[in-house]
Image: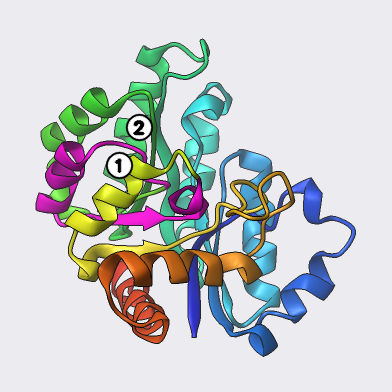
Amino acid sequence: MIFDTHAHYDDVQFDEDREQLLGSMGENGVGTIVNVGSTLTSNQMVCRLAEKYPYVYGAVGVHPTETEQLDEENFKWLSKLLEKDKIVALGEIGLDYHYDRPEPQIQKLWFERQMELARQKNKPVIIHSRDGAKDTLDMMKALQAQEIGGVIHCFSYSVEMAREFLKMGYFLGIGGVITFPNGKKLREVVKYMPVEQLVLETDCPYLSPSPLRGERNSSLNLPYIIEQIAEIKNISPEDVEAITEENARRLYKIK
């Protein structure tokens, strides 16, 4: 069945029909979802959803643009959340230079702290990197990130940069961008990379695939992404679904 490695069902866009939508996943071929936190508040919702739905797991962490929220007390609380049974990763964390705040020094401080926490708790990391490829890679190398493991979420860089992350043993999260007319760079990455390091993601409610751009995204749209990957890799959609599910279970250590 389809495994969505990165969703945000805690988002307010799902407030009106969250229960109905999540309840429909199994009958539509979606077998497992990892719901990913990005703020202190969203991490609480992530834990509740993982407790409520057998096929929903959680990741907790603080997104780089939200790191001004963090202090030592909140960091201890985050550490405790990682000990919950169905919390399978620390994320999403990383660097985001698209906006002016918070300043890079703050982002880097809490990226490093959260990476080291993942090492302590033996959890993979979900890395968000936007307009900061070199700094992300340099920090990961300095922190021996290959020993931690994880996924580069919503991968958006070049084949050359993909090669560096893949050499470290990281998975690349592939979502709706692969279907966009301007998604040529990502299609080149998918053609280059080994399918054994590829996982599916939606980042829902964002990044709906074509032809649904501009609409609210959900895990039910993953077949559009599967079809595109199957075409690029010259394998069947069924093989894409099976291989990426196995990859996701390895990534998150879910049997």
**In contact (CB < 8 Å): disc 1 and disc 2:** yes
Give the x, y percent position of residue 123. 33, 59
Give the Cα distance between marks 1 and 2.
6 Å
Residue 191 belongs to the span the image colors magenta: no
Give the x, y percent position of residue 88. 43, 65
Q: Is residue 128 visible?
A: yes
Q: Regarding mark 1 in the picture, which secondary structure is present there?
A: helix
Q: Regarding mark 2 in the picture, which secondary structure is present there?
A: helix
Q: Nearer the viewer, residue 67 or 244?
A: 244
Residue 175 belongs to the span the image colors magenta: yes
Which circle marks residue 111 in the picture? Answer: 2
**Span colored in magenta:** 154-180
Left or right: residue 21 versus residue 70 is right
- Who's the residue at 73% across and 73% down the image? 22
Which circle marks residue 115 in the picture? Answer: 1
Q: Nearer the viewer, residue 34 or 174?
A: 174
- Who's the residue at 66% across and 62% down the image? 218
The part of the image, by quadrant, that contains residue 131 is: top left
The part of the image, by quadrant, that contains residue 133 is: top left
Taking the view exactly as shown, the residue that stands out farthest to the right is 16
Q: Nearer the viewer, residue 208 or 133?
A: 208
Question: Against 177, is 105 above or below?
Answer: above
Give the x, y percent position of residue 173. 38, 55
Left or right: residue 87 versus residue 251 is right
Exactly how many numbered labels are in the figure?
Answer: 2
How are the residues colored?
rainbow
Amino acid type assigned to the residue bearing label 2 in the image: Phe
Question: Against 208, is 55 above or below?
Answer: below
- Who's the residue at 49% across and 53% down the image? 179
Q: Is residue 252 visible?
A: no
